[in-house]
Image (tube, rainbow, N blue to C red):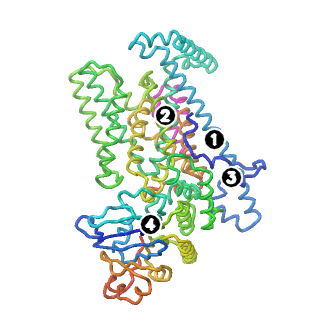
């Protein structure tokens, strides 16, 4: 499911001139670059060979990328499945009406979910036995991993559009708005004894913040960074005020630092579930609006002339960003969440040949960063957020080294 | 049969600064209109008003017989903006991806059909860049890049091509080829509105001229424009042509 986020996948198949010969040099993907082109035009036959080889390596590259995306999608689907049984085993909504509870017992869904859940943890024990670790036998680790893998899909997915709209910092802004939301949640909890999810409040406030930024940019200069800076500092200011204020009234039940830097213990069952729902929603929306978002990103004026409702798609993109940011805060923390929207995309833009490839590579680089970051954080007992971002930057630097168009891919004005 | 574009007494100001003042003009089907005027004369503003990118303070604009605010046939217009407004210079988008955008207004939220793709391929062929289809737009030369944008406009099977200084930064040879392409498209019945700073090019190619400097100084066929004083009036007493590069 998650592997199918891009609808018009017609150019996924290898091109008409793809060559059946085996590939000699996987590294020669840069054949189409002007510099190497110019070098090989001195000798016509070798230029032809170069083009053919370029096609071959490109189709191999495509196959590897698609395999990676399919794998990511499959893993994500399995992990969403895990979160689903984790939910079902508690007989959700059963308290509302006796008939709902009887659905679980008569159909056997409830007991089956419990059984499956235990099997996962037993498999986790075996995994721990093999790895010599003490992680995968615990449900909270699985929730954390599931949340991370899902963040690795949706953050770069939305980020690809943001980076190329030159809205890289909007993620940072909305993360700070979400922080204000968490502060509001803490205050509500303290004042009313409400025990709902802080993330849910953060989600609402962050979406409102997104609409606010959108309104500001439309009523001032277009996507200047001034509204973004105002919103960023403004919401953080409100957040700190609210937290200090509620500290005087009630004992704050949560560690703010965990929200700032991301932590294992922030991911609750509810938070992971929220991430699963957000992922399905965001992937579905991008699948449906892939073309429109691409068009407004590439040439907003031409998109307007083609009668696309640019304002609507801009709003959609910003709201999706808010949603993704709130989900990702659990793993990355308020301060670092923007990195996951930007860094994998920057790395992918260095080496990708097309926009579709940029999307695929962004997600793959995102997942690599998540997996490497988790491995490092788990093994060293360090925060996940910092580990993931450092891993992502490592991949970015590698991408610059590999690419011979360093610095040309993304320039800001 | 309705006109392609119909402007009635259109005025537009940026704050207190009038950019376009009381302009009325029509573009008929099959017209090749050259829109000229000195630097900062409101050419681009007028084009944006015609395309509905801006709403006039006064007056009205109709596109294909529909008031521009209600206009919903985005697939009938192909637009090539000034290069600076597109991300083509930085974004990793291939020529083929760019040209396929011309079909997006037709496809809506559905996948592009095989027919859409065939039309995009044909557009690539028409402008002669099929061999560049898999290259990134930002790896092309200025002339090649403009061809990609023209191909995108063609792929939309538009009845009107609107071009805003399409040849800035394009070498002379590619420019000639580019204008030949425009002429042959116009011969096929596509209406063209062209903003161009090189008046020579416009008078050679366009069959109608609109010369503006906030106000409309001339609107008519090219011969009458060449014989009139509109050029020197619009460009000031010296009549020198200001070459402007954005």
The image position of residue A255, as x and y in percent, is 34, 24
Q: Do callouts 1 and 2 point to residues on the same chain?
A: yes
Q: Is A115 rendered above or below residue A242? A: above
What secondary structure is found at the residue carrying circle 4? loop
Viewer-proximal residue among B54 and A208: B54
User: Which SS class for mark 3?
Assistant: loop
Which quarter of the figure is the N terminus of chain B placed in?
A: bottom left
Count of numbered badges drawn on the protein? 4
Residue in view at x 77 percent, y 47 percent: A22
Chain containing the residue with disc 4: B
- Which residue is identified by label 2? A151
Residue depicted at 27% across the width and 33% down the height: A240
- Assess disc 4: are there few (<14), some (14-19) or many (≥20) residues with their C-alpha within 10 Å of its C-alpha: some
Q: Nearer the viewer, residue B229 or B243?
A: B229
Pointer 1 residue: A66
Which element type, helix, strand or loop, lies under badge 1?
helix
Residue occupied by mark 4:
B82
Mark 1 chain? A
Magenta span of residues: A372-396
**Residue A352 x %, y %:** 58, 50
User: How many neighbours does mark 2 have within 10 angstroms: few (below 14), some (14-19), or many (20 or more)?
Assistant: many
Callout 2: SS:
helix
Marks 2 and 4 in Cβ contact (< 8 Å): no
- The span from disc 1 to disc 3 (Cα, nearest Å) is 15 Å
Q: Chain of mark 3?
A: A
Circles 2 and 3 on the same subunit: yes
């Amino acid at each position: 499911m998650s592997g199918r986020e891009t609808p018009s996948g017609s150019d996924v198949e290898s091109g008409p001139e793809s060559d059946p010969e085996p590939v000699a040099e996987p590294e020669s993907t840069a054949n189409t670059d002007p510099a190497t082109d110019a070098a090989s035009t001195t000798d016509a036959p070798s230029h032809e060979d170069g083009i053919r080889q370029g096609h071959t390596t490109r189709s191999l590259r495509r196959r590897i990328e698609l395999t990676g995306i399919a794998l990511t999608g499959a893993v994500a689907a399995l992990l969403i499945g895990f979160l689903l049984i984790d939910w079902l085993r508690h007989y959700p909504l059963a308290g509302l009406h006796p008939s709902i509870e009887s659905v679980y017992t008569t159909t056997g869904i409830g007991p089956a979910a419990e059984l499956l859940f235990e099997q996962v943890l037993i498999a986790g024990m075996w995994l721990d036995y093999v790895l010599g670790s003490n992680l995968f036998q615990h449900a909270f680790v699985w929730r954390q991993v599931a949340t991370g893998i899902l963040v690795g899909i949706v953050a770069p997915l939305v980020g690809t559009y943001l980076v190329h709209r030159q809205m890289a910092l909007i993620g940072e802004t909305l993360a700070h708005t979400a922080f204000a939301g968490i502060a509001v949640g803490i205050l509500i909890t303290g004042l009313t004894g409400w025990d709902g999810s802080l993330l849910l409040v953060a989600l609402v406030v962050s979406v409102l913040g997104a609409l606010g930024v959108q309104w500001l940019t439309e009523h001032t200069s277009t996507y200047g960074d001034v509204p973004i800076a105002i919103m960023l500092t403004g919401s953080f200011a409100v957040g700190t005020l609210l937290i200090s204020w509620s500290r005087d009234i009630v004992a704050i039940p949560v560690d703010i630092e965990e929200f700032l830097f991301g932590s294992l213990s922030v991911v609750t069952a509810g938070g992971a579930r929220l991430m699963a729902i957000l992922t399905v929603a965001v992937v579905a929306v991008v699948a449906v609006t892939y073309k429109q978002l691409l068009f407004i990103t590439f040439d907003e004026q031409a998109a307007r002339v083609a009668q696309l409702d640019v304002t609507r798609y801009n709003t959609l993109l910003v709201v999706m960003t808010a949603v993704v940011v709130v989900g990702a805060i659990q793993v990355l923390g308020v301060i670092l969440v923007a990195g996951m929207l930007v860094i994998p995309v920057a790395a992918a833009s260095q080496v990708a040949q097309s926009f579709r490839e940029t999307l695929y590579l962004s997600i793959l680089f995102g997942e690599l960063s998540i997996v490497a970051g988790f491995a490092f954080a788990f093994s060293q007992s360090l925060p996940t957020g910092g580990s993931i971002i450092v891993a992502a930057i490592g991949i970015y630097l590698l991408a610059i080294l590999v690419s011979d168009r360093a610095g040309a891919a993304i320039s800001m004005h | 049969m309705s006109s392609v574009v119909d402007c009635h007494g259109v005025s537009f100001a940026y704050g207190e600064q009038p950019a376009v003042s009381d302009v009325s003009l029509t573009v008929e089907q099959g017209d090749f209109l050259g829109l000229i005027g000195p630097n900062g004369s409101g050419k681009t503003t007028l084009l944006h008003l015609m395309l509905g990118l801006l709403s006039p303070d006064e007056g009205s604009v109709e596109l294909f017989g529909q008031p521009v605010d209600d206009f919903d046939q985005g697939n009938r217009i192909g637009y090539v903006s000034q290069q600076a407004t597109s991300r083509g210079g930085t974004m990793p988008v291939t020529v083929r991806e760019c040209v396929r955008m011309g079909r997006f207004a037709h496809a809506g939220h559905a996948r592009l059909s095989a027919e859409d793709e065939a039309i995009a391929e044909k557009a690539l062929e028409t402008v002669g860049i099929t061999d560049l289809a898999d290259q990134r737009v930002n790896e092309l030369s200025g002339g090649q890049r403009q061809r990609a944008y023209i191909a995108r406009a063609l792929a939309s099977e538009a009845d009107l091509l609107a071009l805003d200084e399409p040849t800035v930064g394009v070498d002379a040879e590619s420019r000639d080829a580019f204008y030949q392409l425009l002429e042959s498209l116009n011969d096929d019945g596509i209406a063209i509105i062209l903003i161009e700073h090189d008046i020579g090019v416009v008078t050679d190619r366009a069959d109608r001229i609109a010369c503006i400097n906030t106000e409309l100084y001339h609107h008519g066929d090219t011969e009458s424009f060449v014989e009139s004083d509109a050029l020197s009036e619009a460009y000031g007493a010296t009549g020198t042509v200001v070459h402007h590069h954005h």
